Structures are given as structure tokens and as C-alpha cells.
Image (tube, rainbow, N blue to C red):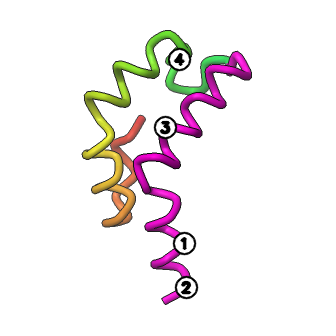
Amino acid sequence: MYEEKLLESILRRDNLEQAQRQVIKNKGVAGVDGMTTKELPLYMIENTKDIIHQIRHKRMDSLL
């Protein structure tokens, strides 16, 4: 029960947007996927629903 509430809190749109702003503010470097902070906003617009769905259904293998 607690884990479900925590996951829903993490996946709230405002929380994801805040995390994205923080990564950009911190000038995050490209990770294993090679994505830059310049690419992140468009990627999130295009993929947020799919990412959330995959996380909720524990199918994160295709995120990279």
C-alpha cells in the first residue's frame, strides 16, 4: 500500500516536471542513453505517458 502511494507521488506530473527542471538547472550530463539536457524537454513531452505506463507495469527494459 505504502509503495503504491509513493510510486503515484513520484509519477505525478508536477513532480516529474520539477525533476526535469532540476536536471536542466544542474546541467546534467548525458547518461548511458546519450541524451543531452537540450533534448530532454521534447523527449519528455513525447514519451512521459509511455514511461509512466512502463514504470507502473514494471516494464522499464525498453526505456533506453
Secondary structure state at the residue bearing disc 3:
helix
Element assignment for label 4: loop
Magenta region, residue range: 1-28
Callout 3 amino acid: Glu
What amino acid type is highlighted by mark number 1?
Leu
Q: CA distance from mark 2 to mark 1?
A: 6 Å
- Mark 4 vs mark 2: give the one in front: 2
| Type of amino acid under label 4 | Gly
User: Is there CB contact under 8 Å for labels 3 and 1?
Assistant: no
- Give the number of the mark in front: 3 or 4: 3
Determine if the magenta segment contains residue 61: no
Residues at circles 3 and 2 in contact by the CB criterion of under 8 Å: no
Give the prevailing secondary structure in the magenta stretch: helix
Q: Is residue 24 above or below residue 3?
A: above
Residue plotted at (65% across, 31% down): 22
The earlier-in-sequence mark between 3 and 1 is 1
Q: Residues within 10 Å of mark 3 (few under 14, many from 20)?
A: some
The vertical placement of 7 against 19, above or below, is below
Mark 2 in CB contact with mark 1 (< 8 angstroms): yes
Q: Nearer the viewer, residue 53 or 17?
A: 17
Residue ID for mark 3: 17
User: What residue is shown with label 1?
Assistant: 6
- Alpha-carbon distance for marks 3 and 1? 17 Å
Image coords of residue 20 (percent x, y): 54, 32
Residue 38 x, y percent position in the rendering: 50, 10
State how far apart marks 4 and 2 are (Cα).
34 Å
Quote the CA–CA distance across marks 3 and 4: 20 Å
Circle 2 is placed at which residue position? 2
